[in-house]
Amino acid sequence: MRAELASLELRIGHRFSDPGLLRLALTHSSLANETRAGRGTPAGDNEQLEFLGDAILGFLVSEALVRRNPDFREGELSRLKAHLVSAVHLHGVARRLELGRYLELGRSEEMSGGRAKKTLLVDALEAVIAATYLDAGLEAVRGFIAMHVMDAPASTDEDAGTDVQPAIVDYKSALQELAQARKMPQPRYSIVRERGPEHSKTFTVEVRAGKDWTGQAEGRTKKVAAQRAARGIYERLLQEAGPATDAHPEPVG
């Protein structure tokens, strides 16, 4: 295998038993179409691998979200999944892997800046996921998804010119880190209300970060309610919104 693809294997974290799979995953239809037109031996492209990779990605992201967040409801899981499989997020993953360097493009696509196009990079990433699955099975892809998709840092959407936050699944930790970075008191959580029968209670939890930042949220468990409350303060802090109203909760026992 040529050195370029060997260096990509290091980035991916998988050495291919069948290097042809990785090469096919990086081959855009523009090159395949040119060779079919008589410029060389007919070549395949990554469109079928992209199709398979999209399905594998959706399944493994869903699996990871359910395992990491057993208390989350369907709506919360769907919101997180939508972000993780979005073109914006996957574009950031592809750019960090520098997939553009390794694409096999036809002349027209090369001349039009195809190596930097979001669609081509996202398609190639999904094709690489499928190639990894076909080469080594689901466990190899599960590790790739965990490292490069689930736990990816914030990425920049160059088209929109804005920073895109990663899908946060632990807002309590995220709020604690943000408060520390801004030299604020550490968040304090307290239960302000419990309602419903013992077998189906709803909890209202309040979080305070300093004297000016406070918010409340409900949940079927104390943990879920606290996460939702933390998320509210976290997102408001990022937007530098005004302080919430004061309240006097009972301490969490």
Image (cartoon, grey):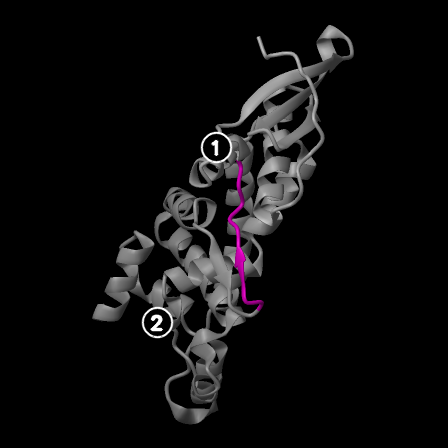
Give yes or no for residue 164 being in the magenta stretch.
Answer: yes
What residue would you read off at disc 2? 102
Magenta span covers which residues?
A: 160-169
Q: Which mark is residue 58?
A: none
| Disc 1: CA contacts within 10 A as few (<14), some (14-19) or many (>=20) | some
What residue would you read off at disc 1? 176
Q: Which of the image's four quarters has the N terminus?
A: bottom left
Residue placed most toward the observer, 105 or 187? 187
Q: Quadrant of residue 119?
A: bottom right
Residue 113 locus on image (x, y percent): 46, 82
Please state the total of marks drawn on the protein image: 2
| Disc 2: CA contacts within 10 A as few (<14), some (14-19) or many (>=20) | some
Residue type at the position of mark 2: Tyr
Who's the residue at 68% across and 24% down the image?
219
Residue placed most toward the observer, 118 or 162? 162
Who's the residue at 39% across and 71% down the image?
100
Q: Quadrant of residue 242?
A: top right
Residue 39 locus on image (x, y percent): 40, 92
Disc 1 vs disc 2: which is toward the camera? Answer: 1
- The answer to whether 207 is drawn above or below residue 250 in the figure is below
Residue type at the position of mark 1: Gln
Give yes or no for residue 74 being in the magenta stretch.
Answer: no
Q: Secondary structure at mark 2?
A: helix
Q: Main secondary structure of the magenta part?
A: loop
Residue 98 locus on image (x, y percent): 36, 66
Name which of mark 1 and mark 2 comes first in the sequence: 2
Who's the residue at 39% across and 73% down the image?
103
